[in-house]
Image (tube, helix red, strand yellow):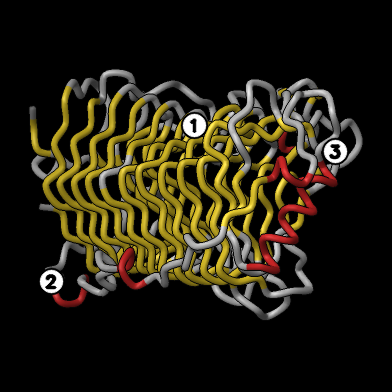
Amino acid sequence: MGKLAISVLILAVISVSIFTFNYISPGKLDSTEELSSNLNQIKEVEIPTDKIINAKDYGAKGDGVTDDTAALQNAIDESSKENALLVIPESEQPYFITKQLILSKDTHISGYGAVLFMAPEEDTIRNMLWSDPDDIVTNISIQGLTLRSENTIAGVDYYANSMVSNVQGMYFQGVETMKINDVFMDNVYVGLKISQTGNQKNKDIKVSNLKIDHSGMPIQVSGTNGFSMVDSTLNSNEGGTKWLHSAYLRGDNSNFYFKNVEFNNASGGGIAIAGNPQYNNPPENMVFKDCRIKDSVVGVHINSGAKNITISGLVIEGSSLGFKINEASELNIDEVSISGSKWNANDHGGFSIENVGQSTISNVTIDASDITESLCLLIGNIEDLRLSSFEDNNVKNIPLYSVNSTAKIKNLIIE
């Protein structure tokens, strides 16, 4: 095992005026906001315990044949009106639905042992659980429910080379104070999709023990302030294009917290944190603790203005490129393990760092057995970057660090 800081190979000839190793004070780099208490800052849902409604009392059969859409919608509407807990009882067969179920404020669903099934759709995208973007819905909880479809449709565009259902599990817009726990989704197009409505951001969303299998994109979130996910597994479909991610965290997102979450099988990034011109602000203030990424083309993709991102205790296995970072700042990446690299024509190596400022990457262990490019590539404008305590295994004839010939670097420290 050797220290990357000891052996540095610069591929390009760069003048001293634009490439210098200067000392960076710790205070200058330590600009990330501490969000370890974010989980406790998110407002809790108030789940009623004094009044219970049974979906079967409203005609729901759960026999896998009867269309239970109307019965379940009536039960949801009544439970919302009465602020009661709606129980969808366990059933040997699924509750078959043909249209989206609309959730309003004070909707609380407990579906332990119950499966909602929607058949795949050939020509359009449909949702199973949905909120009307014209209404702000508050105090929502969904527990113990399974949502399922079938991936039998040939995917197109981003989903090319994959089989899809064109059925989304949950799509919410304009939600405040929501809790999702012990929920399972299978064969869904997007599992959990959350976006803002107009200028109204979503806020205070807690997710725990969510498992999504065989989804083109397990979660996609934008326009949200205050989101946490713990103890969950997000498994994408293999195939598709490089733009599909296990978790796609887009613009106008802030104050996110993930702990003990797996992001697997993505044809894009396991975790993708990216702004977009359609949003007013890039994603910011996000914490990822003790998470894992397996068999995704890129482990973590951070770009388009994302800032104040803290990642610690991350294990990446079977990715072609561990981190792809472009146009980002105030990153604090610590205690990372990268191994089992898989060859890919476009993305490969340990780190690709482009146009990054005020950031630190430390305590990284890389197994370079199957890496064919440099372990850390610097591109574009790099300012105030610290690379500290890199350890490598099985480095062969590849550079430990390499710098693109057009790079402009100011205040870089390698130790």
Residue holding disc 1: 297
In percent of width and height, residue 178 lies at 53, 63
Number of numbered discs on residues: 3
In this image, 340 relative to 335: left or right? right
Q: Amino acid at mark 3?
A: Thr
Determine whether the residue tagged by mark 3 lies in a helix, strand or loop. loop
- Outermost right residue: 123
Q: Amino acid at mark 1?
A: Val
In this image, 165 relative to 276: left or right? right
For the residues marked 1 and 3, what is the alpha-carbon distance in whole angstroms?
A: 35 Å
In percent of width and height, residue 243 lies at 62, 41
- Outermost bottom residue: 199
Q: Amino acid at mark 2?
A: Pro
Task: Please state which of residues 82 and 230 is positioned toward the viewer in this rendering.
Answer: 82
- For residue 128, which quarter of the picture? top right
For the residues marked 2 and 1, what is the alpha-carbon distance in whole angstroms?
A: 33 Å
Q: Residue at x 64, y 36 (%)?
A: 147
- For residue 174, which quarter of the picture? bottom right
Residue holding disc 2: 26
Q: Which mark is first along the chain, 3 or 1?
A: 3
Q: Which mark is residue 156?
A: none
In percent of width and height, residue 74 lies at 79, 54
Q: Are marks 3 and 2 in contact (CB under 8 Å)?
A: no
Q: Residue at x 43, y 36 (%)?
A: 233
Q: Does any portion of residue 82 appear in the rendered image? A: yes
Q: Residue at x 36, y 53 (%)?
A: 258
Residue holding disc 3: 98
User: Is label 1 or label 3 in front?
Assistant: 3
Q: Residue at x 73, y 77 (%)?
A: 198
In percent of width and height, residue 387 lies at 20, 53
Determine whether the residue tagged by mark 1 lies in a helix, strand or loop. loop
